[in-house]
Amino acid sequence: MIKKTLLLFSFLFILLISSQRINAQNQIVKDTLILKNRLTSKGNMYSGITFNFSTKDTDVKQGLLVDVSDQSRNQFKMSVDAGYFIKDNFALGALISFENDRHNQTETDQQGTKTAVQYAKDSYGIYGGMKNFIPLDSKRRFYLYNLVLLGTSFKHIIEERTTNDLLKRSYTKDVALELQINPGIMVNVVKGFSIEVGAQIAGFSSTWSKTTLNNEVTEKSHATDADFSINLLRLNIGFYYYFPIKKHSK
């Protein structure tokens, strides 16, 4: 009887220890999966699209030297980017951007002479970037982020001014090296999908420019600029997807 009791207690003890070890291992696996499934964990990736746009129509605008009438402006900017988290909350990536700006207006000087103005700008950019995140809550739903970009942009501007049937066409080509700082906030809407809202608060650029007027070179220049302005009316709205590269076993 004593032997049977000892054997029973021994079996129960071994079973208890084994179950505790299994539970501990399961908890470790569960914690690891939770860590891996966080949006900004090491080994994850993200990709997304960001855009902003603005439109403006003005019937009459009085100025010091000229009056502007029948003004219309449409501007659109879009960027596509992706990145890889080399450690938790820190990713390296790349970004491609495109911007389109069109506006038309009529200018009237103090002598009553009218000039029809047509303006078109297209710009493209390619950048490398680093993006770091700061979680704001324990559920990892809200994050602050900062995106730093370094790269090159190409800008083409055409402006046509017609006065008394005399056309003047200027063409400007810019090539710039740029450093941009873009902070914002990210909200995890559903698993893996998020909405990000941000704005550029600082920028440094070195630009080489060439302008021709009626096919004759009128200007070649090089400029270095620093911009610390914040335009809250031109916030960038982005839609992103965060995902692990490899599926994690359960």
Image (spheres, rainbow, N blue to C red):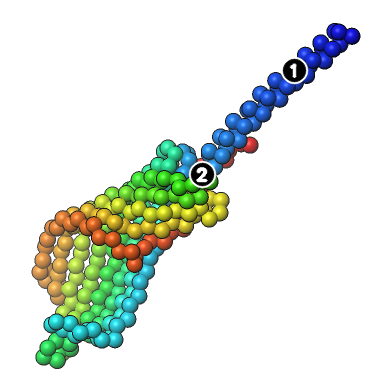
Label 1 packing within 10 angstroms: few (<14), some (14-19), many (20+): few
- Residue at the disc numbered 2: 138
Q: Which residue shows up at 36% across the image and 49% down it? A: 146
The answer to whether any part of residue 101 appears in the image is yes
For the view shown, which residue lies furthest in the bottom direction? 112
Q: In which quarter of the image is the N terminus?
A: top right
**Side of 187 relative to 69 (left or right):** right
Vertical position of residue 189 compared to residue 22: above or below: below
Q: Position of residue 184 (x, y in %)?
A: 38, 54
Q: Quadrant of residue 57?
A: bottom left
- Residue at the disc numbered 1: 13
- Real-space Cα separation, disc 2 to disc 1, in angstroms: 38 Å
Q: Which residue shows up at 41% across the image and 54% down it? A: 185
Q: Position of residue 24 (x, y in %)?
A: 63, 27
Label 2 packing within 10 angstroms: few (<14), some (14-19), many (20+): few
In this rendered view, identify the residue nearer to me: 91 or 245. Answer: 91
**Side of 142 relative to 21 (left or right):** left
Identify which amino acid the numbered label 1 is placed on. Phe
The answer to whether any part of residue 163 appears in the image is no
**Side of 160 relative to 188 (left or right):** left
